[in-house]
Image (spheres, rainbow, N blue to C red):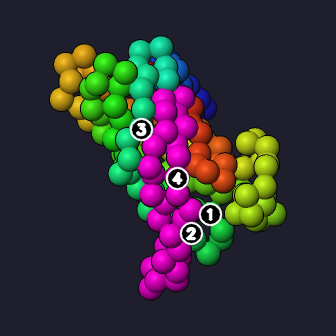
Amino acid sequence: MSGLSETLPGALREIRTRPLLTMKLAVRPLLVIGETPLTTRRIGIVFGGKFEGERLSGEVLDGGSDWQSVRKDGSTLLDVRLILKTDDDALITVTYKGIRQGPPEILARLERGEVVDPESYYFRINPMFETASETYAWLNNMLAIGTGHRFVDGPVYSLFEVL
């Protein structure tokens, strides 16, 4: 008996991607709201950064935020909104959800600001973009995925267009 996936065309059996950009965020020290009825809430204020890629590059503007929810298992859910400004002055909003999780000892080291191997934990995001720029209108109709690594002063991400 053959499996359902074996009957699917190739486009439905794999995800293809293409590099989009690398982004480094500058984040102020986390504001720890604390244990709420729903979660342990923390907020990171994004005050800058930069991004670069083959099709767009520029800076991350002041005013973004990263609303984090730390679950009881130690994993962190992200809810982020940013404003990008390209080198040719186009404004692009990016929103993403994400998750950072891994072995408790690795997560504890990250929380203390220690350097860890990015392959020792899982950190993924799903960015979506919005812009009025005709030059970058192609971003409005794309899904992206990204992988990240956390540093004390903010994360760095590699983003990929899902084809």
Whether pointer 1 and pointer 3 mark residues with C-beta atoms closer than 8 Å, the reply is no
Tell me the amino acid under the disc marked 2. Val
Q: Is residue 132 above or below residue 99?
A: above
SS assignment at label 1: loop
Q: Earlier in the sequence, mark 2 or mark 3?
A: 3
Whether pointer 1 and pointer 2 mark residues with C-beta atoms closer than 8 Å, the reply is yes
Q: Earlier in the sequence, mark 3 or mark 4?
A: 4
Q: Is residue 9 above or below residue 129?
A: above
Q: Earlier in the sequence, mark 1 or mark 3?
A: 3
Gap between marks 1 and 2, in whole Å?
6 Å
The residue that mark 4 highlights is: 27
- Residue 4 on the magenta segment: no
Q: Earlier in the sequence, mark 1 or mark 2?
A: 2
Nearest to viewer (mark 1 / mark 3): 3
The residue that mark 3 highlights is: 60
Tell me the amino acid under the disc marked 1. Ser
Tell me the amino acid under the disc marked 3. Val
SS assignment at label 3: strand
Q: Nearer the viewer, residue 63 or 56?
A: 63
The stretch in magenta equals: 22-51
Place of residue 121 in the rendered image (x, y in percent of width and height, measured from the top left) = 72, 50
Q: Residue at x 18, y 29 (%)?
A: 132
The residue that mark 2 highlights is: 70
Tell me the amino acid under the disc marked 4. Val
The residue that mark 1 highlights is: 75
SS assignment at label 2: strand
Nearest to viewer (mark 4 / mark 2): 4
